[in-house]
Structures are given as structure tokens and as C-alpha cells.
Image (tube, rainbow, N blue to C red):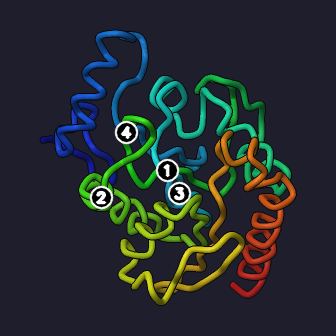
Amino acid sequence: MARTLTEPDHDCGLCPRLRGFILDNRKHHPDWHNGPVRTFYPPEGPHAVRLLVIGLAPGLRGANRTGRPFTGDDSGDLLYATLGAHGLAGGSFEMGADDGLRLDKTAITNAVRCVPPENKPVGAEINTCRAFLSATISHLENLRAIVTLGKIAHDSTVRALGGKISAHPFGHNAQTVVAGIQLFSSYHCSRYNINTGRLTPEMFNAVFADVARFLSRDQALG
């Protein structure tokens, strides 16, 4: 299987279940992206990234359709609005990857790059795709902070950085340091979490307010 340093090939077959699910969706929706979703970078490229946001996996009718993380369904509404409110994104966010939205010193990716059935990757798929997550993190030479959205993304990120879950447990609005990187964790900004009240816009904003303060202090010290 051909691959780049940080991303799986569009026809990646490392996870048979995910591959089969994508092939089935290609039959029903040939105009969709239907492949691993690549990391979304700022216009300046990976070298400009100081913050990485890590979600779980592409949504079936969201990123799996459009090819851009958190784009095409409701999951991106809160994320991109919050990034914009803290100067980490600009432009107009719409339901397509050609909306003119741009990131500022921020990149967005997923712990699992392919859409899983029922939005539930299994352990083997998370472990397999961690190779790409690790490579992505290593590729960001100026990375200072990571926001993990949900426990699966958090745990996989801790492992990708060489840490132990027991020493860095997930918790909403929790912070920890792993391998010199400041980790901020949050409940996932899914429509389900918003509708059930598990996550409110105020709770989500508080996480990124802390992130923005950390990056501002870090830049001043640097």
C-alpha cells in the first residue's frame, strides 16, 4: 500500500472492515470523497502549526462526503465557530470544503482517518491508524498544544506521544503534559453531545479559551 509520511493512501486497505464500508459507500455515493480524510492545515503548511485538534473519525455524511475534517454535517458548526472566536480560524465556514475557511496556526485531524460503521471504530482500527497520527504529530515541528475531542482521541493521542493512559486520564477541560506537548481534552462536539447537554457551547469555549491563553503565553516566552 502506497502512503505518504503522515496520511494513508486513498485506497488504504489496512483495516478490512473500514475498507469494505468505504467500498460499499462508493457504490451508493460515487460522488463522495469515500476515503481516508487527510489532515486540514493552515495555508502556510505544517511548519506553521502550533495547535493540533484531534477528533475521533470522519462522519459518514460529513468529512467522508466532503473530504475535510468536521465539514459537511453538524459536527463542525461549534468547532469552527469556536476556533474563529479565538483567532484560530477565519473566513466563512459552510458545508463544503471549498468555502474559503482557513486555519491560523492550527491543524485538524482524526485519530481514525476512515469512516467507521455507526461512528464506532474498533480497537484494532484505532491502533492501526495510530501510526498515521504519530507521524502527523512528529511532522509538526512547531507544535505546542493538542486538543483531543473525546476519550478515544485522547487515549490514542497519549499513546502516540509515548505516554500512559493511567498517568494522563481523559476528562473534560482537563490538561496534562505528554512528551513536552500541552494536552487539553474536551467532550466531542458531536450533535448528540450538544443535544443531550453533555457539552454546551460555554463548556467548549472554556477549553479553547485556556488553549488561546496557553499559546499566547508560550509565544511571549518564546
- The residue positioned 60% from the left and 26% from the top of the image is 72
Density class for disc 2 (Cα within 10 Å; few <14, some 14-19, many ≥20) is: few
Marks 3 & 2, CB-CB < 8 Å contact: no
In the picture, the quarter occupied by the C terminus is bottom right
Q: Mark 2 against mark 1, which lies toward the viewer?
A: 2
Name which quarter of the figure residue 134 lies in.
bottom left
Q: Name which of mark 1 and mark 3 comes first in the sequence.
A: 3
- The residue positioned 46% from the left and 61% from the top of the image is 152
Q: Which residue is mark 1?
A: 109
- Gap between marks 2 and 1, in whole Å? 18 Å
Query: Label 2 sits on what residue type?
Result: Gly
Residue 127 % position (x, y): 28, 61
- The residue positioned 51% from the left and 84% from the top of the image is 168
Front position in the image: 119 or 221? 119
Q: Name which of mark 3 and mark 2 comes first in the sequence.
A: 3
Q: Which residue is mark 2?
A: 123
Location of residue 32 with respect to 11 vertically, above or below: above
Q: Which residue is mark 3?
A: 54
